[in-house]
Image (tube, grey):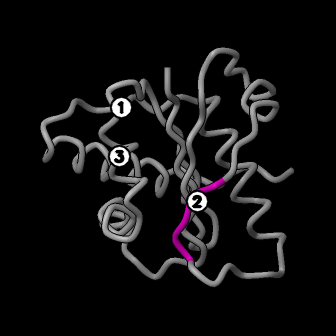
Amino acid sequence: MASPSDVDLGVSLRLVRALNALRAKRQFGPLPQVESADALAWQLVVEMQKRANRPAEPYGPVTLTTSRARSAGFKSSRLVGYRAYKAGADVRVLPQVWAQQLDLFSRDVLDKRVICCGAAHQNRCYVLIFVVK
């Protein structure tokens, strides 16, 4: 599997900064970005790129099975993920777009049990993962 480029890593870092800015506006502390969640988000982004079928709605939740969470090293955590497929939005406003489009995202972003996150980007496709205690 290909590795993320420096540009992809930079974009994913900006996505997490934007997420934390959104959390700060709502009086919540920042979420640390962890490497294992980033690696899982990268796998999902690569899978999105390989699929020929585009979803009807570019913004939506990502299904993360318990076995996939365990294989990524999250033994006692629940993972929640969101995707933006070929999103035209600026990465700095992407968390706000998710919050406007998806009620679940607003709930998850403010969940006090969320302990960290991971993000990935490739070719205007984004994945954001929350790790819930």
Please provide percent x and percent y for residue 11. Answer: 47, 58
Q: In this figure, which residue is indicated by the disc labeled 1?
A: 31
In 3D space, how far apart are the residues under numbered discs 2 and 3 (Cα atoms)? Answer: 23 Å
Disc nearer the start of the sequence (1/3): 1
Q: Is residue 17 toward the left or the right of residue 66 in the image?
A: left
Disc assigned to residue 121? 2
Q: Disc 3 on helix, strand or loop?
A: helix
Q: Nearer the viewer, residue 12 or 87?
A: 87
Q: Amino acid under label 2?
A: His
Q: Which residue is mark 3?
A: 107
- Look at 34% across and 34% down and name the residue there: 111
Compare residues 126 and 55 and report the one nearer the observer. 55
Report the magenta residues as a range: 58-62
Tally the numbered discs. 3
Q: CA distance from mark 1 to mark 3?
A: 15 Å
Of mark 2 and mark 1, the one earlier in the sequence is 1
Residue 60 covered by magenta stretch = yes
